[in-house]
Amino acid sequence: MSGHKPPNPTSWHLVGIALAVLGGRACFAAVKTMVVAPDGSGDFKTMQQAIAAVPDNSPDRIVIHIKPGMYGGQILLPKTKSNVTFEGEDAGKSILTYSLNVNDPIPADVQRMFRGTGVVILGDDFQARNMTFQNTSGNHGQALALRIDGDRASLTNCRLLGWQDTLMLNNGRQYFRGCYIEGRVDFIYGSATAVFDQCEIHSKNGGHVTAASTPRDHPFGFVFLNCKLTGDAIPWISTTGPSTRPDRVTPKADLGRPWRPYAKPVFSV
């Protein structure tokens, strides 16, 4: 005997969930690529210009290759823009950044329902890889780095950085692999079914990791497979003074609280 344990049936079942999240879809369509570069060396200088050039309801996958740089302002992928990939060259260098929260004045080009949100994904079959999505507003209320409303989104090797409500998974089925996600308050939340596979989930100054609002008839909400849970060793210091007493130990985090009555987060190691 080799000494290897037989596969855990529950683990295989959870892997099956991950496959179901993606709808069992194989991608054999053609791929078309456009390049965004802030210095003007690509096809477009801004993300929103590139998105506007994506054909509506394209059967082909459109890859928006994002050169290193900081891309500010809200970015919205409409419902009609499906099969779109945001592709960075390095997760630490291709950065989509936003600095507003829900309490800030609403810019003229932002819809009220998406206030305080950096990137909004409404189209189905969205993909992202080697990207950073961040909201730098800090401890000032809800400030989303990324909101996904479309179905079958897939993110690989991405960084999602924020404080409160970093990642909103509002609908659909989503899959995250090898991603780093950090925040403090309810920083992974929403009603979607989502699988987090081999991700690092980092709690800043304690707080709540998840706030699921899973519908009653959905068997799964958020499923964390072989993820690493980490946290700040030193209590966070706000700009208005210390956030804790000097004698406080390392801040504690909890795995989640229900946003609505039927929340279903699962952590499997």
Image: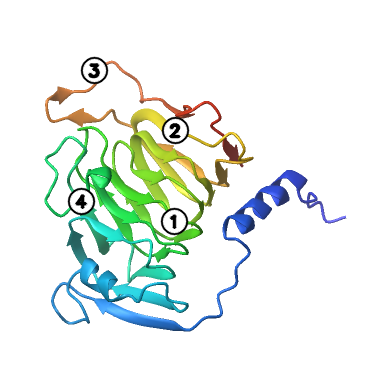
Residue at which label 2 appears:
211
Residue at which label 1 appears:
150
- What whole-number distance in Å separates the C-alpha atoms at marks 3 and 4? 32 Å
- What whole-number distance in Å separates the C-alpha atoms at marks 3 and 1? 45 Å
Tell me, for residue 199, which label it has, or none: none
Local secondary structure at mark 2: strand
Q: Nearer the viewer, residue 45 or 250?
A: 45
Q: Earlier in the sequence, mark 3 or mark 1?
A: 1
| Residue, far right | 1
Mark 2: give few (<14), some (14-19) or many (20+) Cα within 10 Å: many
Q: Amino acid at mark 1?
A: Gly
The reply, left or right, for residue 170 in relation to residue 215 is: left
Q: Residue at x 24, y 16 (%)?
A: 245
Q: Amino acid at mark 3?
A: Pro
Q: Earlier in the sequence, mark 3 or mark 2?
A: 2
Mark 4: give few (<14), some (14-19) or many (20+) Cα within 10 Å: many
Residue at which label 3 appears:
246
Question: Residue 63: where, in percent of width, then height?
Answer: 37, 75
Mark 3: give few (<14), some (14-19) or many (20+) Cα within 10 Å: few
Instruction: State which quarter of the image contains the C terminus.
Output: top right
Q: Amino acid at mark 4?
A: Tyr
Q: Nearer the viewer, mark 4 or mark 1?
A: 1
Local secondary structure at mark 4: strand
Question: Residue 214: where, in percent of width, then height?
Answer: 53, 37
- What whole-number distance in Å separates the C-alpha atoms at marks 1 and 2? 19 Å
